[in-house]
Amino acid sequence: MSEAVITETTRAGVRTLTLNRPDRLNAANDALLLALTDALRRADADDSVRVVVITGAGRGFCAGQDLGDVSGRDMTFTEHLNHTYNPLIRTIRSLGKPVISAVNGVAAGAGASLALAGDIRLWAQGASLIEVFSNIALVPDSGSTWFLPRLVGYHRAFELMALAERVRSDDALRLGLCEQVFPDETFVQDVQAYAERLAARPANALKLTKQALVFAQTSTLDEALDQEAALQQLAGDHWEHEEGVTAFKEKRPAQFIRDGE
Ligand code: T3D
């Protein structure tokens, strides 16, 4: 049996996790979801990994829950979400490294949530996103109700969810659902180049920046200011900060990758 998630790591510290059920547009069964969460946790624990990329094999990114896998399941919907999708989304958000959702094709249902959950969202020209849940009379899950309205506002989110409208890449860029759109033909190379650029940035500072941003999304301004002050101490005490300042004074590019890190 082929692996549900293929793991590859480059020398630059980019770990790519490829959902690998291409004949089902990478629709998620439990094996895939648990393998992906496990792979993310491993990436977090591995000091040689500086950036994580999640993408899909074949023409789809992820078509959401595998609908062939639902009937006869011995879990309720609530139990299933708490067992599979929710730990996955929480792991992405709490991961101490940037996670790129590299959306190579259609992202539907929980696959749309996965596409939105990355810290950076890179799309291929031919990619699309569908909050498809209402087509099968379900509620958007895996974080879609949290991510989407923050990006497009309540009303647009409701419309996209109620009508299960397909959002194509040009609209996704306009609506803020992705940061970059790359040509289909060069997507893999463009994502890799982007990820390597990110991997050369100061890893500790990026980890703390993510922590601060995630915290601030549910905090008051006062709480965010306190959190920034605490995290700035951690950043300022780290060797990366000294290197950044020294490089500035010496008028050379900062070197944020050290041997053995
Ligand atoms: O705990 C819980 O269970 C609740 C959690 C729910 C989370 C969810 O994600 S609910 C939403 C589940 N997903 C869907 O409802 C999406 C269903 N798929 C589609 O609507 C369409 O396939 C797409 C719009 C995504 C793409 O359409 P298209 O025309 O590009 O491709 P296609 O021909 O429909 O699909 C290609 C193959 O993939 C096809 O198989 P075949 O006929 O070639 O053998 C199709 O059946 C299969 N496929 C696509 N999506 C799924 C799937 N098989 C199983 N489950 C899928 N979700």
Image (cartoon, rainbow, N blue to C red):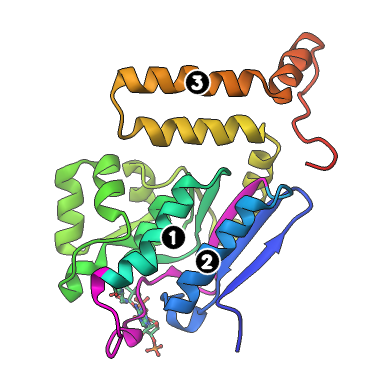
Q: Position of residue 141 (x, y in %)?
A: 27, 61
Discs 1, 2 touching: Cβ within 8 Å: yes
- Closest to the observer: 110 or 162? 110
> What is the secondary structure assignment of the residue under circle 3?
helix
Q: Considering only vertical position in the picture, is 205 above or below 182? A: above
Q: Which residue is drawn at 48% across and 35% down?
A: 211
Whether residue 25 is visible? no
Q: Within the magenta stretch, is there residue 143? A: no
Range drawn in magenta: 50-78
Q: Residue 88 carries which label?
A: 1
Q: Within the magenta stretch, is there residue 73? A: yes
Q: Considering only vertical position in the picture, is 89 above or below 146? A: below
In what quadrant of the picture does the N terminus appear? bottom right
Q: Residue 27 carries which label?
A: none
Q: Mark 1 or mark 2: name the one nearer the start of the chain.
A: 2
Q: Considering only vertical position in the picture, is 62 above or below 53? A: below
Q: Is residue 93 rendered to the left or right of residue 245? A: left
Q: Residue at x 60, y 79 (%)?
A: 3
Q: Which mark is residue 230?
A: 3
Occupied quadrant, residue 77: bottom left
Whether residue 175 is visible? yes
Query: Residue at the right extreme?
Result: 259
Can you identify the residue that label 2 sits on?
36
Q: Badge 1, how many Cα within 10 Å: few under 14, some, many 20+?
A: many
Q: Where is residue 99 in the image (x, y as percent from the top left)?
A: 53, 49
